Image (cartoon, rainbow, N blue to C red):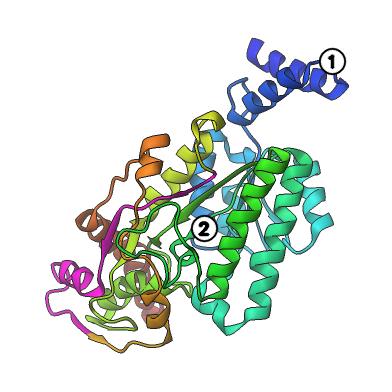
Amino acid sequence: MFRKCLTSLVQNTVSVGTLTPKATEFLRRSVHNGSLGRPPKILITGGLGQLGIECAKLLRSQYGKNNVILSDIIKPNDAICESGPYIFADILDFKGLQKIIVDHQVDWLIHFSALLSAVGEQNVPLAVKVNIEGVHNVIELAKQYKLRIFVPSTIGAFGPDSPRNPTPNVTIQRPHTIYGVAKVHAELIGEYYYHKFGLDFRCLRFPGVISSDPPGGGTTDYAVAIFHEALRTGKYTCYLRPDTRLPMMYIEDCLRSLLEFMRAPSEQLKRRVYNVTAMSFTPEELAYKLSKYVPNLHVTYQPDSRQQIADSWPEVFDDSEARRDWNWQHKYDLDGLVDYMVKDVQENYINVENGQRRASAKI
C-alpha cells in the first residue's frame, strides 16, 4: 500500500513541479522501471508481426495483462482480442499516436512496425513511409512525452563494405537495401535524440529471428520456411546457396534480450545500439540438423535476388559489448533451436491442419 501511495505522490508532485529537476528525473525513471510500485504502461506498434504477439505475452507475464497494449492496422483474431488490450494504430498518423499515448498514459514504446528486407525492395516508396517516416513520428512523440523507446535494428544495417566475420558493434555501415538504409537512419536519429534531448532511446541489432510463425518476407526466413515445408512434404527449395552463413537466434532468446535490455539501468549502457546474437549457420548445416527428424529430407538450392542481399550481410555477429555491458547471454544453440522448432511447428501447424482435414472429412 505504501508503494502505491508513494507512486501516486510522485506523479502528483512531479505534475505540480515542486521537485528539483534531478529528483524529478530520478522518480520518472523509477516509475518507468517499475521500482516504485507502478509497472510501466507499454505500447507495441506493428504488434501482429513476427515479434509483437510473443513480445506482448512475455511483457504481460511480467507487468500485467492490461499494462501492455498491442496495436497494428490489421484486424486481429478473437484469440488476440481475448489475450489483452488491442487497438488500431497507424504509425503514419502522428496525432492518432499522440492521442493513444496520452489516453493510455504510455511509458514505454516498442516500435516493431516495418516492411522487411525482401518486401521493402518490392515497394520502396512504401518502405520509406513506414520505415523512415514512421520512426520519425514515434521518436518525436517519445521525446515529447519522455517515453523509453525501443526500435529494433538488424544485420541488414550493414553492407558489403562492412567486415563480415566478425561484424563488430561499431564499423562502417553502407547497406544496399532500403530496409537497411532505414535501420541505419533509425539508429542515428535515435542516438541524436539521446544526445540532444536526453531521450531514453534503445536499439538492438537482431540477426535472423526464428519462430514457428510462417515466414513473413525476410531474407533469413528460409530458416523458418524449411521447417514448415520439410515437416509437411519432406522437401524444401532454398532461395540461398547452401554455404550462405548468417547470424540467427531463436525467438525466445530474442525477446528475452529485449526485456533485459529495456530493464537495464540507463547509466549501465555505454551505447544506445548493440549487436545481439546466438549462433551462425548455413542452410546446409540447418538441413543436416533437421534431417535427424526428417530422415529422407530432400533440399535443393535455387538462389534468387535474396542471395545478393544475404551476401552483403554479416556472417558472424560480434555481440561482446552487449555481453559486457548488460550481461547478455543466449540460451539456444543450433541443436536446441531445431529441437524446439520441430516441436512448435508440428504441434501448432501440422497437427492442427491434419485435425482440421479429418474434421472436414467427417462432415
Q: Secondary structure at mark 2?
A: strand
Q: Which residues are magenta?
A: 272-299
Which x, y percent locates residue 270?
Answer: 50, 37
CA gap, disc 1 and disc 2: 39 Å
Q: Earlier in the sequence, mark 1 or mark 2?
A: 1
Image vertical order of residue 152 relative to residue 263, above or below: below
How packed is label 1: few (under 14 Cα within 10 Å), some, or many (20 or more)?
few
Mark 2, Cα crowd under 10 Å, few <14 / some 14-19 / many 20+, is many
Residue at the (42%, 65%) spot, across then down: 213
- 9 shown above or below 247: above
Amino acid type, residue under disc 2 in the picture? Ser
Q: Is residue 1 visible?
A: no
In this view, the residue in front, 32 or 162, is 162
SS for callout 1: loop
> Quadrant of residue 285 in the image?
bottom left
Q: Is residue 144 above or below residue 152?
A: above
Q: Residue at x 31, y 45 (%)?
A: 330
Q: Is residue 182 above or below residue 87?
A: below
Measured from the top left, where is residue 361 in percent x and y?
37, 81
Q: Is residue 24 visible?
A: yes
Q: Which residue is denoted by mark 1 in the rendering?
A: 18
Between 98 and 305, the residue placed more toward the observer is 305
Q: Which mark is residue 153?
A: 2
Residue in view at x 54 percent, y 63 percent: 49
Quadrant of residue 340 in the image? bottom left
Is 262 a magenta residue? no
**Name of the residue lying farthest toward the top:** 2
